[in-house]
Amino acid sequence: MTLDIGAEFGSSETASVDGVWVPLGGDAEIKVSRLGNPSAQKAYRQIPRPLRRQIEDGTFSNEQSNNFLSNFMADHLVKDWRNIVEKVVDSKGNESLKKVPFSIENAKKMFKKFRRFRDRIWEIASDEDIFNTGVEEDSKNLQKASGGT
């Protein structure tokens, strides 16, 4: 049996840079670009060498690591999201769900507040299969079906 190397291991540069829509649960979805996209690579190279050494050696404190990853991911990996809500409690103790519109600042806040959310997005950005050559057509179909932006 032969192997079509391009079909199996090819990457879509468009998907890698512009991102792909990935379901998160319910009707929530997030648009994420590949971890190694050019913007992320360039930003990483611009980090001062002593700081990069701390990142690579794992000598960051948990707080430093949390802040760095949250900012880096919001700036370079997440492109958009839909239908993300957060439970809020008013002064009388009443709970409600508040829609969290996408913005880089909101992404930073959510990543800092919800470690598991940040971890899940890191997994998505690191999953090369999500950005394979067949993903462009799938992403277009998902956007049409959901009234994508």
Image (tube, rainbow, N blue to C red):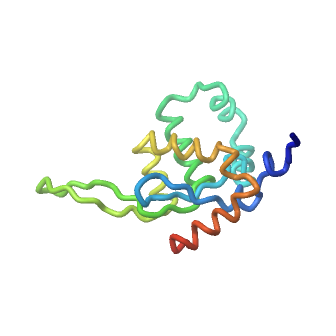
Left or right of residue 102: residue 140: right
- Along the viewing direction, whichever of 100 and 15 lies nearer the viewer: 15
Q: Furthest-right residue in view?
A: 2
Residue under the image location 72 percent in, 47 percent down: 36
In the figure, 78 relative to 64: above or below?
Answer: below
Residue under the image location 69 percent in, 58 percent down: 135
Q: Furthest-left residue in view?
A: 92
Percent of width and height locating residue 136: 70, 63
Residue under the image location 50 percent in, 44 percent down: 118
Image label count: 0
- Quarter of the image that includes the C terminus: bottom right
Q: Furthest-front residue in view?
A: 1
Percent of width and height locating residue 75: 59, 54
Q: Quadrant of residue 139?
A: bottom right
Residue under the image location 55 percent in, 55 percent down: 22
Percent of width and height locating residue 12: 76, 57
Left or right of residue 98: residue 73: right
Left or right of residue 115: residue 11: right
- Quarter of the image that includes the N terminus: top right
- Along the viewing direction, whichever of 140 and 97 lies nearer the viewer: 140
- Along the viewing direction, whichever of 41 and 142 lies nearer the viewer: 142
Q: Quadrant of residue 94?
A: bottom left
Percent of width and height locating residue 53: 69, 30
In the figure, 134 relative to 2: above or below?
Answer: below
